[in-house]
Image: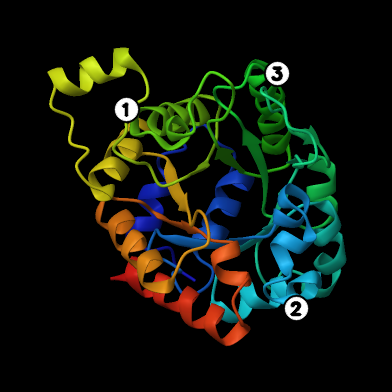
Amino acid sequence: MAYSQRVREILSWYPSDNPGTLTNIAKLLNTGTLAGTGKMVILPVDQGFEHGPARSFAPNPQGYDPDYHAQLAIESGCNAYAAPLGFMEAVAGKLAGEIPLILKVNNSDTLAKVDQPCSALTSSVKDAVRLGCTAIGYTIYPGSGARNTQYQMLSELIAQAKEYGLPSVVWAYPRGSGLSKAGETAVDIAAYAAQIAAQLGAHIIKVKPPTSHVEQPEAQKVFDKYSIPKGNLAECVRHVVQSAFNGKRIVIFSGGEAKDTQALLDDVRQIAKGGGMGSIMGRNAFQRPKAEALSLLKEVMNIFRS
């Protein structure tokens, strides 16, 4: 299909990237219900590793089956499906390009309670190429004492991925003993995490919906001096998007903790109003019965399309 003007504009934000990487960014933007709009909705299913199988899949037992999630992503019209190595190996050969795949190359579990989180590298760029993936995904924890190790690892992985023409999707999740619980989603911290991910070379940046809380006293002074708006979710989202190269990086937002449909859709409307370019929605989708999940994802896509 011919690229829309919006897709061409987004591709122009990455002038140093090779044709292979740009082609795969375009593939992500030109798949599914939102094809050509410059917006995207991605279904990520790394929660079995990150939170455990019962917490992730017991609400909808179909979710124990990796085939279920891939088909949910396809049937709902998602731009892509993201998962760790095991889930991806279970479906990639069956899909053969039916939907873009994002291999989540690092993961962590909840079995150890640590103050300075650092995910393990659980797969490689070569695995992504072998499985026909369109991109790699990687989580960083700005605020962790192990953050610099993660940044260095991510920098190396992005360089490797570019050699194979693969863009990188970065989960930028502030976490660590230096941050309060409220600080993990504070507007100044979320914006800082988005900036770090962009500086490290991320093509697509995933952050949690930011709150109006400001964690850093130094940042609070700046917010006050320049009257940076943060009165609602849309204003907080706008600041986070601005912090990712003045909106010249694709910034998408997670669905967060499980919540009722109306509250979730209200958040999505605010994210869209604030300039967010999409949602990456896992538990809020796949933990529902399939008919409800399909309906929800389609409603989310309708919000971004409008």
For the residues labelled 1 and 2, the Cα–Cα distance comes to 40 Å
Which numbered marker is on residue 183? none
Please state which of residues 126 and 61 is positioned toward the viewer in this rendering: 61
Q: Quadrant of residue 117?
A: top right
Mark 1 and mark 2 in contact? Answer it, CB < 8 Å.
no
Q: Position of residue 74 (x, y in %)?
A: 63, 76
Mark 1 lies on residue: 214
Q: Which residue is mark 2?
A: 62
Packing grade of label 1 (10 A; few <14, some 14-19, many >=20) is many
Answer with the quarter of the image where residue 112 lies.
top right
Q: Secondary structure at mark 1?
A: loop
| Amino acid found under the numbered disc labelled 1 | Val
Of residue 259 and residue 164, the one placed in the foreground of this image is 259
**SS type, badge 3:** helix
158 with respect to 191 (left or right): right
Mark 3 lies on residue = 149
Relative to 48, is 59 above or below? below
Of tags 1 and 3, the one toward the viewer is 1
Amino acid under disc 2: Gln
Q: Earlier in the sequence, mark 1 or mark 3?
A: 3
**Residue 149: where, in percent of width, then height?**
70, 18
Rendered view: 4 above or below 113: below
Relative image position of residue 135 (x, y in whole percent): 66, 49
Q: Residue furthest top?
A: 218
**Marks 1 and 3, how far apart at CA:** 26 Å
Residue 79 visible to the viewer:
no
Residue at position x 31%, y 15% from top? 217
| N-terminal label among 3 and 2 | 2
What is the quadrant of residue 13 in the picture? top left
Q: Is residue 255 visible?
A: yes
The residue shown at (41%, 60%) is 39
Q: How is the image coloured?
A: rainbow
